[in-house]
C-alpha cells in the first residue's frame, strides 16, 4: 500500500521540487534588487524627514511615514522574508511527501 502512495505522489513531489528550486532562485535574485530599492527609499525617507524638521511652517508627515513603511516592507525583513518562509514551508511539504 505504501508503494502505491509513493507512485501516486511522485508527480506531485517532482513538481514541488521544481517549484521550490525555481522559487528559491527567484526569491534570492529579487531580494537583492528589493534591498537596493529599500535602501533608496530609506534615504528618501531620511531626506524628507530632515526637510520636514528644518522647513518652517506646517509640514505633512504622511509621505514620510508612507515611504518609511514601504522601505520596511521591501527590506530583507519584510516581503522577501515572507517569500523565503513560504519556500521553506513548500520544501518541508515536499520532504513530508517524500517520507511517505
Image (cartoon, rainbow, N blue to C red):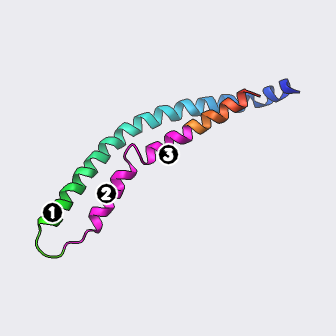
**Circles 1 and 3: CB distance less than 8 Å?**
no
Residue 14: assigned label:
none
Q: Residue 89 location, x and y as percent? A: 60, 39
N-terminal of the two: label 1 or label 3? 1
Q: Residue 82 location, x and y as percent? A: 49, 45
Residue 64 among those drawn in magenta: yes
Q: Residue 17 location, x and y as percent? A: 62, 29
Query: Residue at coordinates 63% horizontally, 34% vertically from top-left?
Result: 92
Left or right: residue 40 versus residue 75 is: left
**Residue 66 figure quarter:** bottom left
Image vertical order of residue 59 relative to residue 24, above or below: below
Image vertical order of residue 18 relative to residue 74, above or below: above
- As measured in the structure, the alpha-carbon distance from the residue carrying label 2 to the one carrying label 3 is 19 Å
Mark 2 surroundings: few (<14), some (14-19) or many (≥20) residues within 10 A: some
In which quadrant is the C terminus drawn?
A: top right
Residue 69 among those drawn in magenta: yes
What's the magenta region?
A: 59-87
Query: Residue at coordinates 56% horizontally, 36% vertically from top-left?
Result: 88
In which quadrant is the N terminus drawn?
A: top right
Q: Secondary structure at mark 3?
A: helix
Residue 82: assigned label:
3
Q: Which residue is mark 1?
A: 51
- As measured in the structure, the alpha-carbon distance from the residue carrying label 1 to the one carrying label 2 is 15 Å
Mark 3 surroundings: few (<14), some (14-19) or many (≥20) residues within 10 A: few
Query: Residue at coordinates 27% horizontally, 62% vertically from top-left?
Result: 64
Q: Which residue is mark 2?
A: 68
Q: Viewer-proximal residue, 27 or 45?
A: 45
Q: Magenta region, mostly helix, strand or loop? A: helix
N-terminal of the two: label 1 or label 2? 1
Amino acid at each position: 500500500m505504501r508503494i502505491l502512495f509513493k507512485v501516486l505522489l511522485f508527480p506531485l513531489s517532482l513538481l514541488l521540487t521544481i517549484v521550490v528550486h525555481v522559487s528559491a532562485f527567484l526569491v534570492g535574485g529579487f531580494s537583492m534588487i528589493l534591498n537596493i530599492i529599500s535602501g533608496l527609499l530609506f534615504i528618501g525617507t531620511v531626506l524628507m524627514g530632515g526637510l520636514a524638521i528644518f522647513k518652517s511652517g506646517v509640514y505633512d508627515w504622511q509621505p514620510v511615514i508612507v515611504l518609511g513603511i514601504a522601505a520596511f516592507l521591501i527590506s530583507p525583513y519584510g516581503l522577501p522574508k515572507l517569500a523565503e518562509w513560504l519556500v521553506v514551508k513548500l520544501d518541508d511539504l515536499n520532504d513530508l511527501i517524500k517520507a511517505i
